[in-house]
Image (cartoon, rainbow, N blue to C red):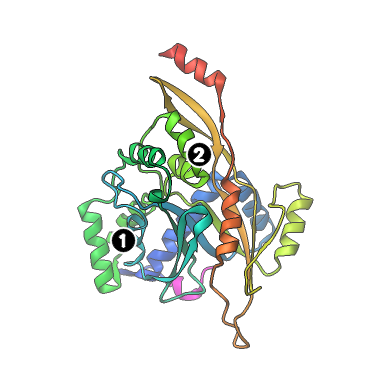
Amino acid sequence: MHVVPALLRPVGERVTRAELAQALNMALFVDVTQRVPMAAAYVADLQRDGRQLVFDHGALRTVAWPSGALPPGEAAITRVLRPLGFTMAAAYPLPRLKMTGRAWRHADFPEDIAQFFVSELHPERFSAGFQDAVTRVLASSRDPLTPVDLAALEQLARDGDLPTGAAAALLPKLVGCFDRQHGLFELDDYHALLSESAEMAWISTEGNAFNHATDRVADIEAVVAAQRALGRPVKDTIETSATGRVRQTAFKAARVMREFLDRGQRARLEVPGSFHEFIQRAPLDERGALDLAFDAGNATGIFKMTAGVGKVDEANQSDQAAAC
């Protein structure tokens, strides 16, 4: 992964907010690579060929709804992003999905530290039955941050850096914020969510994990052609922004097995997981500054990568019932 030289200084007594932000982004990129076989294969190709990737942004989903011990909606994530130096750059209404996306960009290194695209789903725009299912699913949510962690974030927000030991202790706790925080829930609730929102169904199984991580490439068409030649499942089309400056596509989402409760028994279902995305950004002007914006139409198209109906692992379900 390309890292700007300013963030590669020798270890000292203190860690800046930008260095901690870069460390968090790299850890989250590794997490996606471990969960998405196509991402792992693509990164392995780069490593073998001695090429670097540019981490452009990571995307995650939240729910603007009471969520147990977890702050609702994007507040669970922005309380981490702000002290790290990220600021909200723009909001992107996603009315077809009944969501709102927001881009969070780093104030110190806007082109060099990956952005966060944080989306919020709005359950109040869905049926009462859907809202009840959301409430049940999220009710068991825990807060991964302790008062000590929150105090460290407050110190980081105030000073712009932390002692190296404190930063090293905080980093894994920050990584833990990008995960599923609620426990097992009923399979019927999953189907109720899926019937109205593939995005909420995805959140119910994957939580606040990165939905995708994105490689910024120079020639997206060449990348797509190369990946298709290798037989890898790339999205059929390339999404292009209204300005024409931002073009995106992705591998199709990984399929993962998740566990549910089903009338007192445990059942497993194959559901959509995360994926790896590619983006090409053109300069805004002759000075060469990149267009770091997103596009609501692009985002809506990319969100479809995780749409899909799950399939019950009936053999496993029978084994679980026998074991119980």
Tell me the quarter of the picture where residue 237 sits: bottom right
Above or below for 137 versus 3: above
Tell me the quarter of the picture where residue 150 sits: bottom left
**Helix, strand or loop status at disc 2:** helix
Front residue of 59/309: it is 309
Seen in the image, is 90 located left or right of residue 147?
Answer: right
Res 194 label: 2
**Helix, strand or loop status at disc 1:** helix
Please check the rendered image and state whether residue 3 is part of the magenta-colored stretch, yes or no.
yes
Does residue 41 appear anywhere in the picture? yes
Above or below for 90 versus 76: below
Q: Which residue is mark 1?
A: 79
* Residue 250 placement (x, y as % from top left): 64, 55
Seen in the image, is 134 located left or right of residue 162?
Answer: right
Seen in the image, is 69 located left or right of residue 44?
Answer: left
Q: Residue at x 25, y 55 (%)?
A: 149
Q: Circles 2 and 1: CB distance less than 8 Å?
A: no
Q: Which kind of residue does numbered mark 2 sit on? A: Leu
Which part of the image, by quadrant, shows the C terminus?
Answer: top left
Tell me the quarter of the picture where residue 151 sits: bottom left
* Residue 39 placement (x, y as % from top left): 61, 50
* Residue 129 placement (x, y as % from top left): 39, 37
Q: Residue at x 70, y 47 (%)?
A: 233
Front residue of 75/126: it is 126
Does residue 1 appear anywhere in the picture? no
Q: Which kind of residue does numbered mark 1 sit on? A: Arg
Q: Magenta segment, principal secondary structure? A: loop
Above or below for 323 versus 126: above
Q: Going from the N terminus, do you reach mark 2 or mark 1 first?
A: 1
